[in-house]
Image (cartoon, helix red, strand yellow):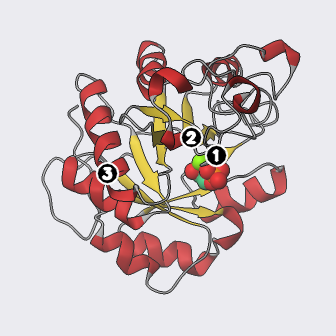
Amino acid sequence: MNLTFCNHHQTMPNTPDKWPYPLWIAHRGAGKLAPENTLAAFRLGASHGYRMFECDVKLSSDGVPFLLHDSTLGRTTNATQQLDAAASDIAGEHPWHTLAQLDAGSWHSRQYAGEPLPSFANIARFCLANGCFLNIEIKPTPGLERITGEVVAHNAAKLWEKAATPPLLSSFDTPALEGARAAQPQLPRALLLDTLWDGWLQAALKLECVAIVCHHTLWNEGNVAQAKAAGFRCLCYTVNDDQAAQRLIQMGIEGLITDRVDLFSPA
Ligand code: G3P
Ligand code: MG
């Protein structure tokens, strides 16, 4: 990794003026067209021309980072059928060897039956082998916010050690971002916002983030200007219609996370 990221408010040498990431980012791999947060979804997103992906990462009980959006297994795996009736539905309470045996594709459609839950390392290798960029959303099991940030950052730094462009780490959880910063301060971070809570800009400054990723309806001319004046890149999620996309691009938003890899051409 040889890029130095910083905000305009910081004065650091060798700061690239150019944001290294593409405008279009495929949400959870390929949005809703394939089972979210699986390698199959990444392959499908890539087949639509996407070169950057967002995914959700948390820890197994033995500390292995893996992809899953929810804290629980029920919605997107076959845990109810596969595990003992008394087993916990909390994903982070299971060791990786148990999670790795689950089917994370059948819930979506028969076509994806047997698709496994991917480890973060598997997905990293896919991205690196295919020249794709990654936005890692740190999505901790409640109670494990800081340690998840630390472990994910350590794993990311190691996996991307020889890559020209590091992954972008993001989270709604400020303790997770604090953990990531403490563990690997050189990795770029973004604060995720689903509301503009009091002190959001100051929090992003304190966490030394390079970007703010808002729900797309929250951005307006005023707060984009405010965020940019403070040195942040402005990104958004989850943009699935053309009118919304045009509004955001005209405002100068530099990253749009979408489910609609079939609608928006990333070229
Ligand atoms: O990272 C952007 C977006 O994924 C945040 O919301 O719930 O889809 O993880 P969610
Ligand atoms: Mg996410």
Of the 4 image quadrants, the one containing the N terminus is top left
Quote the CA–CA distance across marks 1 and 2. 5 Å
The disc placed on residue 166 is none
Residue 167 visible to the viewer = yes
Quote the CA–CA distance across marks 3 and 1. 19 Å
Q: Residues within 10 Å of mark 2 (few under 14, many from 20)?
A: many
Q: Nearer the viewer, mark 3 or mark 2?
A: 2
Pointers 1 and 2 in contact (CB under 8 A)? Answer: yes
In this rendering, is residue 194 above or below 165?
below
Pointers 3 and 2 in contact (CB under 8 A)? Answer: no
Quick one: 259 or 84, which is closer to the camera?
84
Residue extending furthest toward the front = 86
Residue 116 location in percent, x, y? 62, 18
The disc placed on residue 72 is 1
Residue 217 location in percent, x, y? 72, 68
In the rendered image, which quarter is residue 35 located in? top right
Q: Which residue is mark 2?
A: 91
Residue 177 location in percent, x, y? 35, 58
Residue 56 visible to the viewer = no
Image point 62% across, 32% down: which residue?
A: 37
- At mark 3, the secondary structure is helix
Which of pointers 1 and 2 lies earlier in the amino acid sequence? 1
Quick one: 253 or 136, which is closer to the camera?
136
Which of pointers 3 and 2 lies earlier in the amino acid sequence? 2
Q: Residues within 10 Å of mark 1 (few under 14, many from 20)?
A: some
- At mark 2, the secondary structure is helix
Q: Which residue is mark 3?
A: 147
